[in-house]
Image (cartoon, grey):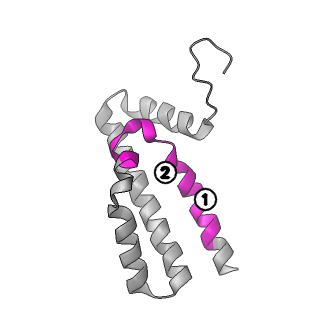
């Protein structure tokens, strides 16, 4: 972070996923986009589970999960590889919310 070319941003999970993608697939942008789509799908599934725990009805949870997955605000998180930092943090925090509701 003290290097001249550094962007002064400490996001270890984001850097780790970028390095893992680069190691596995190289710099092909198709794989960065595919990873964002998969991560968004995981977040939508976890969000649907969270809604199921909150409302205790499957149809309402599915409708809420579908609205969450298709909402236009998420186009940036899925469409651009530079916004790769939101999905991993949600993947780590949503199970905690579900766990809190179950206890």
Whether residue 33 sits left or right of residue 15 in the image: it is: left
Looking at this rendering, what residue extends furthest in the top direction?
4
Rounded to the nearest whole Å, what is the CA distance between mark 2 and mark 1? 10 Å
SS assignment at label 1: helix
What residue lies at 40% left-to-right and 71% top-to-bottom?
Answer: 65
Q: Nearer the viewer, residue 65 or 18?
A: 65
Res. 52 mark: none
Q: Residue 87 carries which label?
A: 2
Where does residue 91 sit, x and y in percent of width and height?
54, 56
The quadrant in which the C terminus is found is bottom right
**Residue at 55% in and 33% down:** 15
Q: What stretch is highlighted in magenta?
A: 76-98
Using residue 40 as the reference point, say whether residue 3 is left or right of it.
right
Which image quarter is the N terminus in?
top right
Residue 95 forms part of the magenta stretch: yes
Image point (49%, 66%), residue name: 46
| Position of 3 relative to 64 (above/below) | above
Q: Crowding near pointer 1: few (<14 within 10 Å), some, many (20+)?
A: few
Residue 78 locus on image (x, y percent): 36, 48
98 left or right of 25?
right
Residue to which mark 1 is pinned: 93
Residue 50: give x, y in percent of width and height: 53, 73
Position of residue 22 relative to residue 1, above or below, is below
């Amino acid at each position: 972070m003290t290097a001249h070319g550094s962007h002064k941003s400490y996001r270890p999970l984001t850097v780790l996923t970028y390095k893992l993608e680069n190691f596995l697939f190289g710099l092909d942008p198709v794989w960065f986009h595919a990873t964002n789509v998969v991560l968004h799908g995981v977040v939508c599934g976890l969000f649907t589970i969270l809604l199921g725990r909150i409302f205790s009805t499957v149809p309402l949870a599915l409708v809420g999960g579908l609205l969450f997955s298709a909402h236009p605000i998420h186009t940036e998180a899925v469409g651009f590889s530079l916004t790769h930092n939101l999905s991993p943090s949600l993947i780590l925090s949503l199970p905690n919310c579900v766990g809190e509701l179950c206890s």
